Amino acid sequence: MKNYKVILPVLGLLIILLSNLALAITAEEIINRRDDNEYIVSARVESEMVIINGGRKMVKTMISLTDGRDGLTEFTNPRDRGTKFLKRGDDLWMFFPDAEDVVKISGHMLNQGMMGSDFSYQDIMESDKLTDLYNFEVIGEEEFAGRPCYLLEGIAKEGAEVSYYRRKIWIDKERFIGLKMELYAQSGRLLKVSRAEKVEKIEGRWLPTESVMENKLRRNTRTEFKIISIEFNPEIPGGTFTLQNLQ
Amino acid sequence: MFIIKLALRNLFRHKKRTIITAIVISLAIFIYLLSDSLMLGIEELSYANIINLESGHLQVVNPDYWEERQEAPLENLIPLSEDLKKKIREIEGFNAMAGQLRFSASLNNGIDEIPIMGLGINPEETERVLTIDEYFVEGSMLTPGKYEAVLGKSLADLMDLKVGDYLTLIVRTKENTFNTIDAVITGLLKTPHPDINDNTVFVPLDIARQALNLEEEVSQIVIRLNRDKEEAREIAAELSRDLTEGGFNLKAYPWQESAETLTAMMQMQDIENFVILGIILVIAAVGIINTTILSAIERMEEIGMMKALGLKEGEIIRVFMIEATGIGIIGGLIGCFFGGIGVTILNQIGLSMNTFGGQDTTYGLPILERIYGGWNPGAFIFVFVFGVVVALLSSILPARWAARKDPVKAIYHR
C-alpha cells in the first residue's frame, strides 16, 4: 500500500511530461513541414526582382527551371535579355549574350551579389536541406506581421560548409512557412534579413510569393523578389541543364 | 695607311653632309641609350618594390598553394612550428622572417562593398622583413591582438574611410561560413607599390586567424636575407632542399618568381627597345647609302683617275667603307656623348611616372614614384659598335657599284 503513494505521483508526473512532449512540435518537424511547403523540387517559375540601391531602382524579370539540384535561369528584361545562369550541383556558370561567353562563377566571386542584388550567388546556390546543415532549436514563440510564429535558431553543424553560421527563422504556426529569417556571421554580426511580404496557397501548398532581402551591412539597399507564376513538375526536355544549352 | 688617309680626307670634304648623316646615327644611339637606362631604372625599382613590400627575398610556401596563390585559398597552409622556424633560421645569409596569412575579403564601409586582399601580419616580424612601416602618411601600425587595420590611402579615399573609422571585412572561414572582422583604422599607407595602396587591408595575424577559424597557420613565410638580391635564387634552392629533407612539404621561392609577370614584361620591353633601335638604324643606313652614292657620283672622275693610276677595285671599296665607318664613329661618339648626358640627368633628377600619362597611371608596374635611370656601360659599348657596324655594312653595296666603273667612262663621267 505504501508503494502506491509513491508510484501515483510519479506516474502522474510522467504522464504530464510525456503528453507535453507529444504536444510540443520539435524544431526538426517544423523545418520539415516548412520544407514540404517551400522546398521546390521541380518547377518552372516566372519571377521579378526589384533591386533598390540608394535612390536607384532596377527591375529584372526572369524565367527559371529547377529540377533537384540543377537549375537554369534566363533573364527576360530588355537590359539583361539572354543572360543565363546554369547551376549544376555545386557549380554555377553564367552566360553573357554580349560577350557570347560562358563564365564559371567560383571562389570569392560567389560572395558577390547576383546581378547587383542583395542575394549573393551563394544564396541562390543553396539547395541542401537546412536540417542537414544546422542544428535547429525552438527558442520561443513570437508574433510576426500579425501571425503567431515559432522562432527557431539554427547553428551550423560542426564541419558543415554553410554560408551563415547562425540563422533565426520565424515560421508561421498554422501555415508552416518562413515569414522572416535573419542570417548571422560567426562573429555574431547580422548580415542579412529576409521577410515574406505576401503568402499564397498554390496547388495546395503555401508559398511566399513576395519577399524582401536586405543586406544589413549596407545602408539603403534591398531586393524584392516576386513570383509571378509557378508551375510544379513541368516537363523539362533532356539536355536543359547542360553547358551546350547555355550558349 | 694611304687608303685610310684618303678616306679621312674625303670624310671632311663635305663636313655638313657627314655631320647630318652622323646625327641620324647619333639620334638612334641617343634614344636607345635613354630608353635602356629608363628600363633599367624601372626594373631596379620594380624589383626593389616587390622585395621590400611584397615578397621579401624569399617566400616559403606550400607548392600546391603557390599554384593557386592568386585566389588566396585557405588550403595548403603552413603550420608554423618551431622546427620549421629553426630550419629557416639556419640558412645562409638569413636576416629575418615573418609569417603572413593572405585571405580574400570584401571591404565594407556600410554603404559599398569591394573585394580586397586581406593580409594577417605580425607587425614586429613584418617590419623586419618588409619596409611597410616607412610609408605611413597618417596614423601608425596596428597592434597584435586588437581589432585594428591598416590600409592604403587610395583605398581608404575610395571607400571614404579615415584613421579612427571602423571598417568591416567580410570573410569566409575555412568551412566557407561568412564571418566579419570589425576593426578600427589605425594607419594609412602610401607606398610605391600600387597593389598595396589599392587592394590590401592589413589586420593582426591572430585576429585574422580567429576570424578564419585557423590554428597556428600562415599562408606564406617571407624572408629577408643579408645578401645581394641576385643570390636569392641559389639560397632558395638550398632552402628548398633542406625543407624537403626535413620532411616539410614546402618550397622556397626567390623574389624573381614572385616577379614573374614583371620579368616577362621587362623582356618584352627589351625586345621593343631593339625594334625601335632597329627602325632608326634602318633610316641611318639609308642615309649612309645615300651619302656614299652621292660622294661616289661626285668623285666619279677621281675614282676613274685612281683606277687608272693602279688602285685596285677592293682598295676603292675600302676607301668608301672607311669613310662610312668614320661617319658611324662620329655618329656613335656624338650619340654616346649626349646619351651620357641624358642618362646622367635621368640618373640624378629622375622622371615622374606621371610624365607618361595622367595621375597614377602605372601600366601595371609596381611603381608609384620617380623613376631614376640606371647606368649600363655595356649598352654604350654595344650600341656604339652596333652603329658603326651598320654604317660599315650599308656602305658596301654603293661602294662596289662605284668601284666597278670603267676608268675611262668614269673619267669622262659617262
Image (spheres, coloured by chain):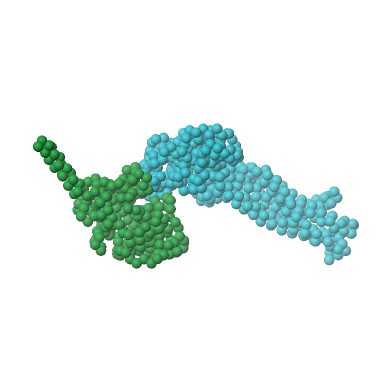
- Chain painted in cyan in the figure: B
Residue A79 seen by the camera: no
Task: Give the quarter of the image for residue A35.
Answer: bottom left
* Colour green belongs to chain: A
Q: What is the quadrant of the C terminus of chain B in the image? A: bottom right
Please count the marks in the image: 0
Q: Tell whether B84 sits left or right of B170.
A: right
Q: Where is residue A61 in the image (x, y as percent from the top left)?
A: 34, 63
For the point 33% across and 61% down, the residue is A42
Rendering coords of residue B19 (x, y %): 73, 52
Q: Which residue lies furthest to the right in this view?
A: B309
Residue depicted at x 33% and y 64%: A44
Please tell me which residue lies in front, B250 or B164. B250
Query: Would residue A148 be found to the left or right of residue B157 on screen?
Result: left
Establish if B107 lies above or below B408. Answer: above
The residue sitting at the left extreme is A1
- B66 sits to left or right of B302: left
Residue A38: x percent and y percent? 28, 57
**Residue B129 appears in the picture as rendered:** yes
Identify the residue at image location x=67%, y=46%: B379
Q: Residue A190, image x and y in percent?
A: 31, 46
Furthest residue to the front? A1
| Above or below for A50 versus B57 | below
Given residues A13 and B285, the one toward you in this image is A13
Q: Residue at x 54, y 48 (%)?
A: B365
Identify which residue, B222 or A218, lies in the foreground.
Answer: B222
